Amino acid sequence: MDLLRNAVRPYAWGSRTVIAELLGREVPAPHPEAELWMGAHPGDPSTLLGADGAETSLLAAINAEPEFHLGPACARRWDNRLPFLLKVLAAEEPLSIQAHPSAAQAAEGYAKEEAAGIARDAGNRNYPDPTAKPELICALSEFHALAGFRAADKTVALLAALDVPELAGHAQLLAADPGPDGLRALFTTWITLPQVALEGLLPPLLDACVRHLRAHGEFSLECRTVLELGERHPGDAGVLAALLMNRLVLQPGEAIHLPAGNLHAYLHGTGVEILANSDNILRGGLTPKHVDVPELLRVLDFSCGDMPVLRGEQVSRHLTAYPTPAPEFELSRVDIPAGAEATEEVLLPSDGPQILICTSGKALLTAEDGTRLELPRGTSAWLAAGDPKTRISSAGDADLQVFRATAGMDG
């Protein structure tokens, strides 16, 4: 097992305090810091920090000894690649409205862009990776998001409550077909509107949201979101699209799983995110970055309904797991309260690769061969499949919280 040094992605929507404070650096940071990447993605692989002072790229280490680092089964299943990527995500401002492709869609899109000669780091590249990108995010703070299409009848009720004459025909379109086909028709209409049409629809919508808030209407949270997005992205079709989506507020420890085709936009907050080892993003709006509406429409899943909020499954006294259908990953969480007996510990049961990050307190990792490694808050570690079995316990006075990334059940 080795400590990791990880890359920080400085996207404009990030926080200047959250990741810097977690890592024990000066606050505020000189620029926004959006994501801390832990893994072996070629775009920003982590570095192994050996006890002897040696530094090695995790990607290079896996390439050199895939069966030791991944385990034979994982190496075979994922063609000698680490199948997951772990992140701490800190959103100070809303992200784009986006979705991610399925495995088949990603392979097809990647092949087309390779054949077209689009550089993998080009700004207009949709598919820098040939793999799917399911995700799960678990809140560390109160976390706000748009995720999945709201049940159509609830959206019809929202549009009726806002009572925007300019949107009456659009509302009738959905009311006449309150299901996936109706949602597809309305979303496609809105996301492809000419700019002049958007400039005629958005001002009366924003005015209606103000009136609804003043009246303390039942859709006040949705209206505040539309107003915020409208202020940040005037004239953007994504403001209309937000009307169709579930508006979520996650409390710490709650999570959502975002499968392929799920339309979503993180709005504000900090979370631990685990995803397949891919950076494929199809954007539809609310961003100055590359937007590809036809490709987004090709991959979207228009199923509608409430977005399930995951609260985790208790595996043992101190271990909570967040299982999903994704074979690439599973996220779990170790919690040991302050004042616990020194003998209280968790055996980390895995025959595959593991990444750990301590988000509270100080962890002590003890391997069967006697090797020990301390993980203070903000530090992370790599446990190769070939490393001895390891136990985790608290080595500090504060509540211990450690998140653990592994491959999925059949990964």
Image (spheres, rainbow, N blue to C red):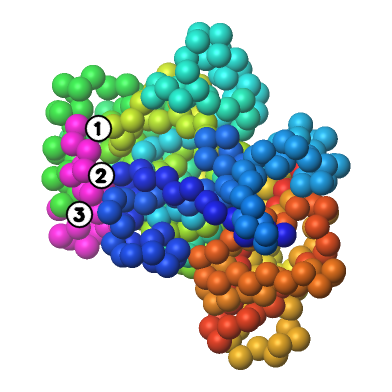
Q: Which of 143 and 84 is in front in this view?
A: 84
Estimate the spatial distance between the alpha carbons at disc 1 and disc 2, rounded to whole Å: 9 Å
| Residue assigned mark 1 | 236
Judge from the rendering whether residue 87 lies leftward or rightward of residue 249; answer left or right.
Answer: right
- Residue type at mark 3? His
Residue 58: give x, y in percent of width and height: 64, 45
| Residue assigned mark 3 | 212
Comes first in the chain, label 3 or label 2: 3
In the image, which is nearer the foreground, mark 3 or mark 1? Answer: 1
- Residue type at mark 2? Leu
| Residue assigned mark 2 | 229
* Quadrant occupied by the N terminus: bottom right
Comes first in the chain, label 1 or label 2: 2
Relative to 98, residue 274 above or below:
below
Residue 313: give x, y in percent of width and height: 68, 65
Name the chief secondary structure element in magenta.
helix
Comes first in the chain, label 3 or label 1: 3
Question: Does the stretch in magenta take in 214?
Answer: yes
Residue shown at 14%/37% (left/top)? 203
- Magenta region, residue range: 211-236
* Quadrant occupied by the C terminus: top right
Tell me the quarter of the picture where residue 379 sits. Answer: bottom right
